[in-house]
């Protein structure tokens, strides 16, 4: 296996993750909505399942504040790597790649948070779904566009 698709996928996933965060923060500015507590709660639940002591509550809260976003970046980068392995030898049209990347990350994050009982998507209203869907679509578009930009025509597959 060549390392280039893995590295290019990781870079694409990191760019997509940054764009997802920018879009989420813009939504907070435009709608004056508070930050989501789900990343920190996910970190809390995962630490509990792994029997990891995050320290006294004041320090644990700070650690969860850092771990939550890091989990998101890790998911985004991992999705980029997986896509890089999938797309290394085939050309995937940009809209399909964006849908695979954005939809895959959304399904992974929402699915894991549902399994951890952090959230229940069945209870989300339309604005909740839009607030989740739009940043993930932005992730997918940014990651797919970055992947295409990093892969010269000779390395994009046939």
Image (tube, rainbow, N blue to C red):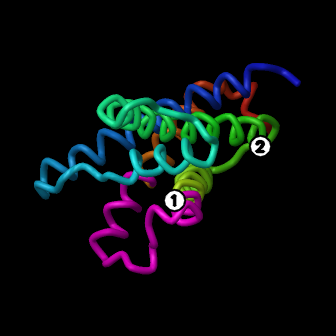
Which element carries disc 1, helix, strand or loop? helix
Q: Residue at x 18, y 53 (%)?
A: 34
Q: Residue at x 58, y 58 (%)?
A: 112
Q: Work out whether residue 98 can be spotted.
A: no
Residue depth check, mark 2 versus mark 1: number of the one nearer the observer: 1
Side of 57 relative to 43 (left or right): left
- Pick the quarter of the image with the C terminus: top right
Q: Which residues are magenta?
A: 111-136
Q: Earlier in the sequence, mark 2 or mark 1?
A: 2
Q: Residue at x 38, y 60 (%)?
A: 132
Q: Work out whether residue 151 can be spotted.
A: yes
Name above or below for residue 134 compared with residue 57: below
Is residue 115 inside the magenta stretch? yes
Dots 2 and 1: beta carbons under 8 Å? Answer: no
Residue 74 image-quadrant placement:
top right
Name above or below for residue 107 compared with residue 63: below
Q: Which residue is mark 2?
A: 86
Label 2, label 1: how many angstroms apart (C-alpha)? 25 Å
Which element carries disc 2, helix, strand or loop? helix
């Amino acid at each position: 296996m060549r390392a280039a698709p893995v590295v290019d996928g990781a870079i694409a996933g990191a760019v997509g993750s940054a764009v997802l965060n920018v879009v989420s923060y813009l939504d907070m500015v435009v709608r004056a909505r508070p930050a989501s507590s789900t990343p920190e709660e996910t970190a809390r639940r995962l630490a509990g399942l792994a029997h990891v002591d995050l320290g006294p509550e004041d320090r644990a809260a700070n650690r969860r504040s850092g771990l939550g976003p890091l989990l998101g970046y890790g998911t985004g980068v991992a999705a980029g790597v997986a896509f890089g392995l999938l797309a290394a030898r085939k050309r995937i049209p940009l809209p399909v790649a964006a849908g695979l990347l954005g939809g895959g990350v959304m399904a992974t994050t929402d699915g894991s948070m549902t399994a951890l009982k952090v959230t229940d998507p069945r209870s989300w209203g339309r604005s909740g779904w839009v607030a989740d869907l739009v940043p993930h679509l932005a992730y997918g578009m940014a990651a797919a566009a970055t992947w295409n930009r990093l892969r010269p025509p000779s390395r994009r597959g046939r």
